[in-house]
Amino acid sequence: MKTVISSMFLVALAALCGCQTSESPQGGSVTKNEGFKISVPYATTTMKQGDVQTAVVTLQRDDYFKQNVQLLISTTKGISLDPTSVLIKSNDKPEVQIRITVAKDAAIGDYGIRVMGTPATGEPASTVFTVKVVSP
């Protein structure tokens, strides 16, 4: 019985600790080790009307992917983002901090924030993370 409980605890702990970001499908070249993925927050970000928070978006490059990538970040009315466009050069730090501002009169509910990365050549990649707006 102790073994079963211990096993269940370890699985739950691994799920909580190991899954903090979500990744996009592969972008860039379909050749192995020449592409990229975009990582965004995995869990839904809960924000109150009028709140401001920061989210980290990370570009994960494969070993031989050395291209610049243009990130476009978009959402719907009620939430504003800064920046909405970022060029991550091949030698830049691969992390971008996005400032998320929820309007005081934003409708309560879930909002998708889409991050699309387009390399100089090759296929784009995109992913979405969710912001849940609640009342203050």
Image (cartoon, rainbow, N blue to C red):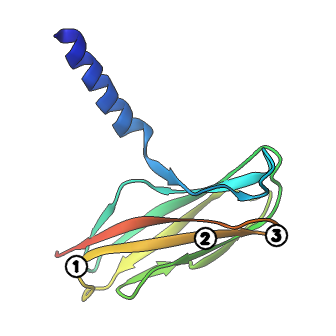
Mark 2 is surrounded, within 10 Å at the Cα level, by few (under 14), some (14 to 19) or many (20 or more) other residues, namely: many
Percent x, y of residue 14: 38, 31
Q: Nearer the viewer, residue 87 or 44?
A: 44
Q: Residue furthest top?
A: 2
Q: Nearer the viewer, residue 68 or 111?
A: 111
Q: What quarter of the picture does the C terminus occupy?
A: bottom left
Q: CA distance from mark 3 to mark 2?
A: 13 Å
- Residue designated by label 1: 108
Tell me the kind of residue under disc 1.
Ile
Tell me the kind of residue under disc 2.
Met
Looking at the rendered structure, the secondary structure element under dot 1 is loop
| Residue 74 to residue 27: above or below | below
Looking at the rendered structure, the secondary structure element under dot 2 is strand
Percent x, y of residue 66: 83, 55
Q: Residue furthest front?
A: 30
Mark 1 is surrounded, within 10 Å at the Cα level, by few (under 14), some (14 to 19) or many (20 or more) other residues, namely: some
Looking at the rendered structure, the secondary structure element under dot 3 is loop
Q: CA distance from mark 2 to mark 1?
A: 25 Å
- Residue designated by label 3: 120
Q: What quarter of the picture does the N terminus occupy?
A: top left
User: Could you say which quadrant of the image residue 76 lies in?
Assistant: bottom left
| Residue 18 to residue 128: above or below | above
Tell me the kind of residue under disc 3.
Ala
Q: Residue at x 47, y 50 (%)?
A: 21
Q: Residue at x 20, y 18 (%)?
A: 5
